[in-house]
Amino acid sequence: MSRATGFKRARSAAKKRPAVLDRAVVDAINETVDAVHAEGVSNINALMTRRTGLLRRRYRRQMRAARKTGVVGYVTRSSARAAFYARFVHDGTRYITARPFHDLAVASQREKHRARMLRAKRRAISDATGRG
């Protein structure tokens, strides 16, 4: 009669997997938030003709690890009030053309974010199972 082995190790790995995956996902989201923010600041520098620095100073990033979300833009009330005209610069008006600095930053990182998340999943699974 043969005896199956490895169940204890498999159960232990299965218990670790969600925590390892959560850490890997938060790290990947943080990388994306940093990349979108850097690209957005770069776009602001490149697209703005009149440079007061207000848009750039108030354009911020925020990582919420508990919720596994990241936010880039004018995330606080004070920055939204101070950079009120950012919506007109970004979306344009009938008098000025749109300069979508944030949309361009998000679009440039879309595929990179997908790759980061897949890499995080693979890394978490290999770390939890002990292979790799």
Image (spheres, grey):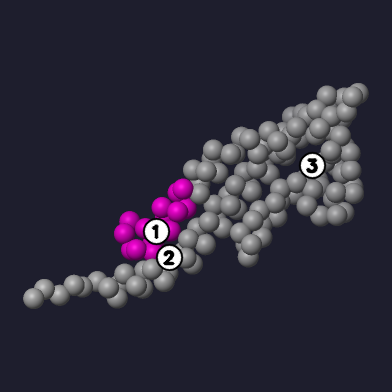
Measured as percent of width and height from the top left, residue 81 is found at 90, 49
Q: Is mark 2 on a helix, strand or loop?
A: helix
Q: Nearer the viewer, mark 1 or mark 3?
A: 1
Instruction: Identify the image quadrant of residue 10.
Output: bottom left
Residue 21 is marked as none
Q: Residue furthest front?
A: 1
Identify which residue is drawn at 33% across, 63% down.
130
Is mark 1 in CB contact (under 8 Å) with mark 2?
A: yes
Identify which residue is drawn at 80% across, 34% down.
90
**Mark 1 residue type:** Ile
Q: What element carries label 1?
A: helix
Residue 56 is marked as 3
Measured as percent of width and height from the top left, residue 45 is found at 76, 33
The magenta stretch is 118-132
Q: Mark 2 points at which residue?
A: 17
Q: Quadrant of the C terminus?
A: bottom left
Instruction: Identify the image quadrant of residue 26.
Output: bottom right
Identify which residue is drawn at 68% across, 44% down.
37
Q: Residue furthest left?
A: 1
Give above or below for 57 relative to 62.
above
> How many residues crowd around disc 3 within 10 Å: few (fewer than 14), some, or many (20 or more)?
some
Q: Earlier in the sequence, mark 3 or mark 2?
A: 2
Q: Mark 1 points at which residue?
A: 125
Left-right relation of 39 to 117: right
